[in-house]
Amino acid sequence: MNQINPDQILTSEEIKSAKDAFEEYDKIGYGILEVEELQKILEEFGHIINYQIRFQDDNQY
């Protein structure tokens, strides 16, 4: 799988803005988002995810 290089598609200002936004949600500071943090972001954008149902669907395969 090819990786996307942000420097090739975003300006330095856009990269800084994205990093700042990420850090706003990365409350633990590990550089990754926990499921709960991601859920909060999605909810703020109007997406409600029922993880119980999603995990049940994944276990069927």
Image (spheres, helix red, strand yellow):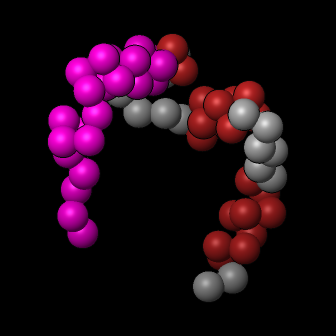
Find residue 5 and report its horizontal and vertical position in percent. 20, 45
Q: Quadrant of the C terminus?
A: bottom right
Seen in the picture, residue 12 relative to 52 is either above or below; the reply is: above
Residue 36: in sight, yes or no? no
Seen in the picture, residue 46 relative to 54 is either above or below; the reply is: above
Q: Which residue is found at the position 40% from the left and 18% from the top? A: 17
Find residue 6 and report its horizontal and vertical position in percent. 25, 39
Find residue 14 and report its horizontal and vertical position in percent. 35, 24
Snapshot quadrant of residue 29: top left
Q: Nearer the viewer, residue 14 or 56?
A: 14
Q: Residue furthest bottom?
A: 61
Left of 50 or right of it: where is 45? left
Q: Is residue 9 magenta?
A: yes
Q: Which residue is found at the position 25% from the left and 51% from the top? A: 4
SS assignment for the magenta stretch, majority: helix
Q: Nearer the viewer, residue 48 or 15?
A: 15
How many numbered marks are there? Answer: 0
Left of 35 or right of it: where is 10? left
Q: Nearer the viewer, residue 30 or 17?
A: 17
Snapshot quadrant of residue 42: top right
Q: Which residue is found at the position 54% from the left and 21% from the top? A: 25
Find residue 53 and report its horizontal and vertical position in percent. 80, 63
Residue 54: in sight, yes or no? yes
**Stretch in magenta:** 1-23
Q: Which residue is found at the position 69% from the left and 64% from the top? A: 55
Left of 50 or right of it: where is 6? left
Snapshot quadrant of residue 32: top left
Q: Quadrant of the N terminus?
A: bottom left
Left of 27 or right of it: where is 5? left
Q: Is residue 15 magenta?
A: yes
